[in-house]
Amino acid sequence: MALSIDEANTMSSKYYDPTLTQQVYEESPFFYRLKQKNRVTWSGGTQIQWGIRYAEAGLARMVGPREQATYEEVETRTGAVLDWRYARGHAMISWDERVKNDGKAQVINLLADKATEMREDMYELFADKLYSTSEGANDFVPLDTIVDTTTTYAGIATTDAAAWAAGFENSAETVLHQYGTASALATAINSCTFGKNKPDLILTTRNLWSKLASWFEGQKQYGDSMMAKGGFTTVSFEGITAVADAKCNTSRLYLLDTNQFEWRTHSDFDMVIKPWVSYEPDYPEAMIKRIVWAGNLMCRMRKTSGKFTGLDYAAS
């Protein structure tokens, strides 16, 4: 008997739907890191809103024991706002596929393939948009916009709040150095360090990651156990985990304080997997299944992250 919609839903909900969302996030080292650190969060409302402190109050001072107290108010906070962004993926089973897959083993394989298609499509979409160097009207905010010294983010311009800018940005340096120059990796880390807040993840291309790894060849390395559980190979520089992402743009290396990032999703649309339904009348006897998401990428403190944008692997 040909595959029915009820049968497809019964088997999908039992074998594939429960893990599909988790698997999408685990394909990317950045999203995997956020997920493991409980930085995938939920909310509702008309927009994504949070408060930031962009300046020190400077109201504490040494005083004499009988000195008259004076008080003043200093503006140090403002509101950050992001609009919701939306994504949708789908899989379709054609009439032909329904007819030709009528045994249990064939049905299981077909539904597994469709689940894989949806997972890979959503991963590819999120990974591509994460590293986009230009933000489209419907896109969530990419890393390049957030980790920047001049761009407005979440409605706040760096000209209005200097501390809202990234801590380091360099587009001129082509050679990656460890120490000793104004644009060395160690210098960049120092520029993004404010007390205990500092980068904890270096995210770069496979080639540039190989350069990092070559620095420590023959030295004992302690890998990041959190990332290792996700299947990611890492090295460490100054206590900061470095990992490669095939999706990262050529010439770029990001220093990220992932404690400041949140993948904020709408509580009603966090990779919600819809049931198989009929696709009549557009495709007779076909059925479709959708996955939907609403959210955006939040950062609560930009100055503890930085980036290189002009690195040349051959020169390095």
Image: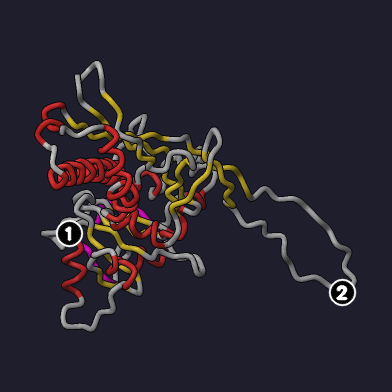
Q: Residues within 10 Å of mark 2 (few under 14, many from 20)?
A: few
x and y, in percent, of residue 34 in the image: 39, 57
From the viewer's perspective, tell me whether residue 107 is left or right of residue 292. left
Instruction: Residue type at mark 2: give it.
Output: Pro
Report the residue that reaches farthest toward the top. 281
Q: Residue at x 33, y 35 (%)?
A: 275
x and y, in percent, of residue 73 in the image: 75, 50
Q: Secondary structure at mark 1?
A: helix
Residue identified by numbered label 2: 65
Foreground label between 1 and 2: 1
Q: Is residue 52 magenta?
A: no
Q: Quadrant of the N terminus?
A: top left
x and y, in percent, of residue 56 in the image: 62, 57
Query: Is residue 20 depicted above or below 279 in this figure?
Result: below
Residue 86 is marked as none
From the viewer's perspective, tell me whether residue 224 is left or right of residue 301. left
Which residue occupies the foreground of this view, 284 or 254? Answer: 284
> What range is drawn magenta here?
168-179
Q: Quadrant of the C terminus?
A: bottom left
Residue 206 is marked as 1
